[in-house]
Image (cartoon, rainbow, N blue to C red):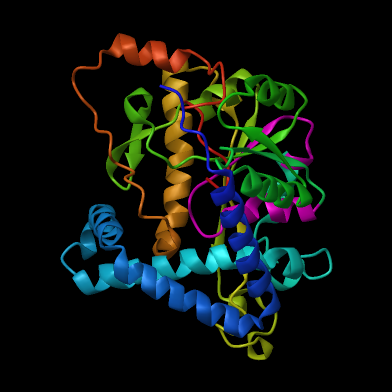
């Protein structure tokens, strides 16, 4: 069935509206911008009843200790909506606020050595993160430090917005690999020792490998582990979470009160995984062990900041079934991806 032609007038109108919102947000004083952001978050929370229900169900399953405490769950849900809208607002502000001269006001690397070492090496690396905190900052902040990274991203349907988003990412030192196709480009980047950012916390459907995530089996993409083994690439599991500035200040007494400057994030290395450590295992076992390890690392970060996680995903949508034979599972786990597509998780921004 042929795709319906896009309405070019509607595409242009939407693009102009987005640019107008960006310009207004950048022109207003930060305090007003954040106040408007919180108002939008409250409205979205109020009208998105279906999404609230999904978030509550996910939280009750992930944190059984508060499953019977609706007030505790609701606090996290409200905090999540507020954080998501604020994080999106901060992406608008980043081009003017985050520079080589100002980044220390907004970003801290608690264990930066663990991040810098694999990124400075000639060996290929995947920067693995999840829908936690402000994940777009992973590639942007590394670009400020001189690292050229690539992100796997699904092209926007609106061509004007696609060009706008692509320029934004490229200005931060990121190359773009289209999610649907361009496997040759990904392979070339890996063979050249490149660094590619991936989001690794999405439901992978029936073709995924099931690993433990918050005590429940979650279908998870195998492509990250397969590509790491194929190209001998290390996995740098990273989180980018909103933090209290005072917690990282040399003199907390002289630090502005929490909330005066909301845009303050910690880029933290949660784990560094070397596929060589699993060379003695079968391919199927290595895929499962590597996938479980980075999933556990992401879970630890989420547990520290549950209100900053995107609980709106149906992460446990796919469930294990007895119908799938061990032979079929082994065949899928041993076959390396041949293209960037449904088997390859998206990069930051998806």
Q: Is residue 266 visible?
A: no
Q: Is residue 125 magenta?
A: yes
Please name the residue shown 84% across and 69% down the image: 101
Quadrant of the rendered image containing residue 30 = bottom right
Q: Is residue 82 above or below residue 133?
A: below
- Quick one: 183 or 237, which is closer to the camera? 183
Does residue 342 lie above or below 41 as drawn? above
Can the viewer see residue 188 in this picture? yes
Vertical arrangement, residue 218 with respect to residue 161, above or below: above
Measuring from the top left, give residue 65's x and y in whole percent.
22, 62
Q: Quadrant of residue 102?
A: bottom right
Please state which of residues 22 and 322 is positioned toward the viewer in this rendering: 22
Magenta span has 277? no
Task: Identify which residue is drawn at 58% across, 44% down.
Answer: 8
> Residue 39 at what x, y percent from top left?
44, 78
x, y percentage for residue 311? 36, 55
Q: Nearer the viewer, residue 203 or 286?
A: 203
Residue lying at 36% horizontally and 48% vertically, measured from the top left: 313
Q: Which residues are magenta?
A: 119-145
Residue at the far bottom: name it.
253
Position of 37 with respect to 216 (left or right) is right
Compared with 313, 84 (above or below) is: below
Residue beneath the point at 28% across and 39% down:
317
């Amino acid at each position: 069935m042929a795709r319906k032609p896009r309405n070019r007038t509607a595409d242009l109108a939407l693009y102009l509206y987005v640019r107008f919102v960006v310009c207004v947000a950048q022109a207003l004083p930060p305090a007003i911008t954040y106040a408007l952001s919180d108002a939008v978050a409250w409205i979205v929370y109020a009208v998105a009843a279906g999404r609230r229900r999904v978030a509550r169900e996910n939280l009750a399953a992930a944190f059984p200790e508060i499953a019977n405490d609706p007030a505790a769950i609701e606090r996290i849900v409200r905090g999540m909506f507020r954080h998501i809208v604020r994080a999106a607002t901060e992406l608008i502000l980043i081009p003017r606020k985050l520079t080589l001269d100002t980044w220390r006001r907004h970003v801290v690397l608690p264990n930066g050595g663990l991040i810098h070492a694999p990124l400075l090496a000639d060996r290929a690396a995947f920067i693995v993160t999840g829908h936690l905190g402000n994940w777009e900052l992973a590639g942007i902040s590394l670009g400020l430090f001189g690292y050229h990274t690539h992100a796997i991203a699904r092209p926007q349907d609106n061509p004007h917005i696609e060009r706008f988003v692509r320029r934004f990412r490229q200005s931060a030192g990121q190359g773009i690999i289209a999610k649907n196709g361009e496997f040759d480009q990904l392979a070339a980047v890996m063979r050249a020792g490149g660094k590619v950012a991936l989001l690794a916390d999405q439901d992978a459907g029936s073709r995924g490998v099931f690993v433990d995530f918050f005590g429940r089996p979650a279908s998870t993409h195998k492509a990250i582990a397969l590509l790491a083994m194929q190209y001998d690439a290390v996995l740098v599991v990273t989180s980018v979470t909103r933090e209290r500035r005072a917690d990282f200040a040399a003199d907390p007494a002289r630090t502005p009160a929490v909330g005066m400057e909301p845009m303050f994030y910690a880029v933290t290395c949660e784990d560094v995984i070397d596929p060589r450590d699993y060379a003695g295992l079968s391919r199927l076992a290595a895929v499962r062990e590597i996938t479980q390890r980075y999933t556990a690392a992401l879970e630890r970060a989420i547990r520290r900041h549950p209100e900053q996680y995107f609980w709106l995903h149906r992460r446990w949508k796919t469930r294990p079934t007895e119908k799938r034979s061990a032979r079929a599972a082994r065949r899928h786990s041993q076959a390396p991806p041949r293209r960037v597509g449904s088997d390859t998780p998206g990069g930051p921004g998806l």
